[in-house]
Image (cartoon, rainbow, N blue to C red):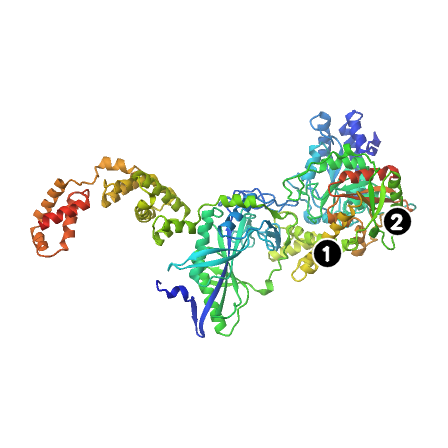
């Protein structure tokens, strides 16, 4: 039964239902795989006892639901009752919440089994998983003919690595500027960020409140659809949660593209674009056309302002959201001898936060400060509105947009030491985040060096179904079967 | 006080270089009356054990989010309507960022840019009866902070988060206040209004109402001077003292060649003085920005209409009605409307008295008003009770007043019966019955008593008849005493006059 971990989530559901294997067997297979792959550093905390108890309850018939017995990994940004939750930060090392996040509570309600907490960039700030206080996550992939370790992408790097390495059937991720889509592309899996407001933010540690959205990462579009249906839903504890019914995405999935209009945004074809990426994009266009879609060229004229806008809005919100980590009530505290409360704050936060988090707190503090607020924050909000309007206008001409997910395949550790070079990784994913749109990455091919590449589909607000259908069409056409 | 000049001549501080006017604006923080906090479900009751009323949201646990409490919104809108203010159907919450241990989030959720209530006004009445309208710039909703306790440990501070997240209305006046008396009258009028509306209990002792006092001084006709802000002053008396002290201090500074620093100051209730709290070097940059966890606060005209319909008759309207419809003096109207409970009590007693006598309210209003503001208030003060705890209820009082009005009881007898009612809690009719306190109008009995008094005081009778009219009162007193106060005073007067003169 060692290949239980290779099954898709859909196959696991069927196998469990047909009693071909038990939930405990399925969970144990994953726990064994986790133990054998600790060098990847994908999990911060493994919870084998909890997982087996949850699986046993499924086998006993006391736990059920659409995801009964499906073993999942949970990004460490989600508060999990009784299990350490750190957001990948030293400042929260040892913090054990007494509450369960809205999203993970939904998954538990539906019978899922939690294997542990997945590593991530500290407070979800990073695109390579190098900023975690618990060490970097290593991608299970290697470039052809090279033994160099590669990044799994970020910030949901632990989720990406674990799903790709078969250390869970699927994982929760969160996406603020691409943190689901970029790592999914880097490790050859699928991942979707729903419309802002679809998934509850309650109990998910905040990075940038107006951008953060949870979503699933899994090895197929259909697997993502199952998880997405469970994770989404109105939560009256989150004021930005949308009080709308959630469709059964898995049931509705067809992959049909006949009569659909697929927009190709001209501005995403950057000067000096990696020819491999450009070729993959063209291939994607050809696939959807042959599936019966109409390809239309659209313009998103404010695209070039998206990255600078994002790097004002997100740090501004983060600088305020992270103020609560002050050492007063929970988390780690550093008290310099003879110091006052302000010395305690400074020492606690100096010791507790990593370099990238500090950088963003400083950027955010700066752009909100008196005299700079209008020039940066107010201006960024205006541009954000223009970017959203770009999409609105484009969606008058098309149903979904097709773009590359990331400008390059996965890179080596330390390759992007310059923060700006790192930030540029988000160039294709950030605009949809700023506009709050549903967007997903699906694996579409391999680079010449044998590394996965993803294509991104962006949809209209609330049209996750359309995004998933286009994703499924790409997935089928690509026939992506490569594995690490 | 009563001369007409006081109304028109501005209050000034006499300095060595001449008269200085003072300019005051008040920011009153009023805790909103609601079961739960502004953005969490935690209770708001005062006096619980430290940190017993703290939700995950109030403690700013990771991943917790604010959700607006609709009752706080309703109370802010009702308050806005009570000051005839513009109600903003679209408002928004901003974060005010600063670090302090009693501020768990590291920011206070407030409304800087788009407050829920805009421009309004409040009329104040000064002791000399003159009135003045004070502009109110805005009312916004915001979270209260927790409380730091510094005296429980030599080197550590404790934090109580019970108050953290409670809803406050910040009511910001225009700089229209020109004297300590006006400042006091404004806060008193505002407190009265909030208590009528029911949006704040106005308990200044418990900190549910406190003011930041902005003061500057200037020579007549000059533009506004630099102001200082004295924080968290928590009684009407202290607010007046803070205004007066701060204005005098500023005049002293200016006249000795110094200049006023725009700064935050603290009021010391023991000395009645203010002192600098923090200087410019600690000036905060609060980095206000719209709270991304909250959507803009939007409501429709129907909601405002509902809020308006739920408002009681407000103090100013009530005072006017008491004068116009009930014929009460401005003084009585003011006393009886000071507290909503008092006015409600008075109106219940008035209606009951009129009904028992089969008369219109205006015909009996003075009788009821005088008794309530005189005898009842006096008794309550003596007993240390609020009107809500009065041993004599409004209907019982009406019965007593009716017995007075129909001649059953004389004035002195009414007082006697009222005392008995206070003591026993029994009704006036029962007491009159049991104790035989009915007024005697029978001329035979009265004549007999008068004769006894005249017989016992032949010298005084002679003096009276010789022209010493003032002795008449003496005879009345003697007769009343002889009849244990039960004689009808009118009859005693008539008969005494007849028998003495005759």
Where does residue B437 sit, x and y in percent of width and height? Answer: 21, 39
Residue A384 in percent (x, y) is at 72, 52
In the picture, measured across the screen, residue B209 lies left or right of residue A223, that is left
Q: Position of residue A342 (x, y in %)?
A: 61, 57
| Residue B398: mark in rendering | none
Label 1: how many Cα within 10 Å (few below 14, some 14–19, many 20+): some
For the image, the number of numbered tags is 2
Circle 2 sits in a helix, a strand or a loop, which is it?
A: helix
Residue A169 visible at all: no
Q: Earlier in the sequence, mark 2 or mark 1?
A: 2
Q: Residue at x 40, y 63 (%)?
A: B7
Binning the other alpha carbons within 10 Å of mark 2 as few (below 14), some (14 to 19) or many (20 upward) gives some
Q: Is residue B478 left or right of residue A450?
A: left
Q: Quadrant of residue B394?
A: top left
The residue under label 2 is: A278
Q: Chain of mark 2?
A: A
Residue matched to label 1: A359
Disc 2 versus disc 1: nearer the observer? 2
Quarter of the rendering containing residue A454: top right
Nearer the observer, B270 or A134: B270
Nearest the eye: B79 or A482: B79
What secondary structure is found at the residue carrying circle 1?
Answer: helix
- Residue B24: give x, y in percent of width and height: 49, 62
Residue A139: image quadrant is: top right
How far apart in space, not on screen, are marks 2 and 1 (Cα)? 33 Å
**Disc 2 and disc 1 in contact, CB within 8 angstroms:** no
Residue A161 visible in the current orientation: yes
């Amino acid at each position: 039964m060692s290949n239980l971990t290779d099954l898709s989530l859909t196959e696991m559901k069927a196998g469990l239902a047909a009693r071909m294997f038990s939930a405990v067997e399925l969970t144990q297979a994953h726990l064994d795989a986790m133990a054998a792959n600790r060098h990847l550093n994908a999990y911060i905390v493994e919870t084998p006892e909890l997982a087996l108890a949850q699986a046993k309850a499924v086998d006993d018939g006391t736990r059920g639901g659409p995801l009964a017995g499906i073993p999942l990994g949970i990004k460490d940004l989600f508060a999990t009752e009784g299990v350490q939750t750190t957001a990948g930060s030293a400042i929260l090392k040892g913090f054990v919440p007494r509450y369960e996040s809205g999203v993970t509570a939904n998954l538990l309600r539906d019978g899922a089994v939690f294997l542990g907490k997945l590593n991530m960039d500290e407070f979800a700030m990073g695109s390579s998983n190098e900023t975690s206080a618990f060490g970097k996550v290593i991608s299970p992939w290697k470039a052809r003919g090279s033994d160099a370790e590669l990044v799994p992408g970020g910030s949901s790097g632990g989720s990406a690595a674990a799903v790709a390495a078969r250390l869970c059937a699927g994982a929760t991720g969160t996406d603020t500027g691409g943190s689901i889509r970029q790592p999914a592309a880097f490790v050859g899996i699928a991942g979707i960020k729903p419309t802002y407001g679809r998934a509850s933010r309650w109990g998910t540690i905040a990075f940038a409140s107006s951008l953060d959205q949870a979503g699933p990462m899994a090895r197929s579009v259909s697997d993502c659809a199952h998880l997405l249906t469970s994770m989404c839903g109105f939560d009256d504890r989150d004021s930005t949660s949308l009080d709308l019914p959630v469709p059964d995405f898995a049931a509705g999935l067809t992959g049909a593209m006949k009569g659909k209009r697929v927009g190709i945004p001209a501005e995403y074809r950057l000067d000096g674009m990696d020819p491999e990426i450009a070729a993959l994009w063209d291939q994607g266009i050809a696939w959807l056309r042959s599936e019966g879609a109409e390809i239309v060229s659209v313009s998103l004229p404010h695209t070039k302002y998206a990255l600078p806008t994002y790097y004002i809005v997100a740090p501004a919100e983060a600088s305020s959201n992270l103020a609560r980590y002050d050492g007063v009530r929970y988390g780690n505290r550093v008290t310099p001898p003879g110091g006052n409360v302000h010395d305690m704050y400074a020492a606690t936060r100096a010791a507790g936060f990593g370099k990238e988090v500090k950088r963003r707190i400083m950027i955010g503090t700066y752009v909100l400060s008196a005299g700079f607020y209008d020039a940066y924050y107010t201006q960024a909000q205006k541009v954000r509105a223009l970017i959203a309007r770009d999409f609105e206008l484009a969606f008058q001409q098309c149903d979904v947009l097709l773009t590359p997910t990331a400008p390059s395949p996965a890179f080596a550790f330390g390759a992007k030491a310059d923060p700006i070079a790192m930030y540029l990784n988000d160039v294709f994913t950030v605009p949809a985040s700023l506009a709050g749109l549903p967007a997903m990455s699906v694996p579409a091919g391999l680079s010449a060096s044998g590394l996965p590449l993803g294509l991104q589909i962006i949809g209209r607000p609330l049209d996750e179904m359309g995004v998933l259908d286009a994703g499924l069409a790409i997935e089928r056409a690509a026939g992506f079967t490569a594995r690490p | 006080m009563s001369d007409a000049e006081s109304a028109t001549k501005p209050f000034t501080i006499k300095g060595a270089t001449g008269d200085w006017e003072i300019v005051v604006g008040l920011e009153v923080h009023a805790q909103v009356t609601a079961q739960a906090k502004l953005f969490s479900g935690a209770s708001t009751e005062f006096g619980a054990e430290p940190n017993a009323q703290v939700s995950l949201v109030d403690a700013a646990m990771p991943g917790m989010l604010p959700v607006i409490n609709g009752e706080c919104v309703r109370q802010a809108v009702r308050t806005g309507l009570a000051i005839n203010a513009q109600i903003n159907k679209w408002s928004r919450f901003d974060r005010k960022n600063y670090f302090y241990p009693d501020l768990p989030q590291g920011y206070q959720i407030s409304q800087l840019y788009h407050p829920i209530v805009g421009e309004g006004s409040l009329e104040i009445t000064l002791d000399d009866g003159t009135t003045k309208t004070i502009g109110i710039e805005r009312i916004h909703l915001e979270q209260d902070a927790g409380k730091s306790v510094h005296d429980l440990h030599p080197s550590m501070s404790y934090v109580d988060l019970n108050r953290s997240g409670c809803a406050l209305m910040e009511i910001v006046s225009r700089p229209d206040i020109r004297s300590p008396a006006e400042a006091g009258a404004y806060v008193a009028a505002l407190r009265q209004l909030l208590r009528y509306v029911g949006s704040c209990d106005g308990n200044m002792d418990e900190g549910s109402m406190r003011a930041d006092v902005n003061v500057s001084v200037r020579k007549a006709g000059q533009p506004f001077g630099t102001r200082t802000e004295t924080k968290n002053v928590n009684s009407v008396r202290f607010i007046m003292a803070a205004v007066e002290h701060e204005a005098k201090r500023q005049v002293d500074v200016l006249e000795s060649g110094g200049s006023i620093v725009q700064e935050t100051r603290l009021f010391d209730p023991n000395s009645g003085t203010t002192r600098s709290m923090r200087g410019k070097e600690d000036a905060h940059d609060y980095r206000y920005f719209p709270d991304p966890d909250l959507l803009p606060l939007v409501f429709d005209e129907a909601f405002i209409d509902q809020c308006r319909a739920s408002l009681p008759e407000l103090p100013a309207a009530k005072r006017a009605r008491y004068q116009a419809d009930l014929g009460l003096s401005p003084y009585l109207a003011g006393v009886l409307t000071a507290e909503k409970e008092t006015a409600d009590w008075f109106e219940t007693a008035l209606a009951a008295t009129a009904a028992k006598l089969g008369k219109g309210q205006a015909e009996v209003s003075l009788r009821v008003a005088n008794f309530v503001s005189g005898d009842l208030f006096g008794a309550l003060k003596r007993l240390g009770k609020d009107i809500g705890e009065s041993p004599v209820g409004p209907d019982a009082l009406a019965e007593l007043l009716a017995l007075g009005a129909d001649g059953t009881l004389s004035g002195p007898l009414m007082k006697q019966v009222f005392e008995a009612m206070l003591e026993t809690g029994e009704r006036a009719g029962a007491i009159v019955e049991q104790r035989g306190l009915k007024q005697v109008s029978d001329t035979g009995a009265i004549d007999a008593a008068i004769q006894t008094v005249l017989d016992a005081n032949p010298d005084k009778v002679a003096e009276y008849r010789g022209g010493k009219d003032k002795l008449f009162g003496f005879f009345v007193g003697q007769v009343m005493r002889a009849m244990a106060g039960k004689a009808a005073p009118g009859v005693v007067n008539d008969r005494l006059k007849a028998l003495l003169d005759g």
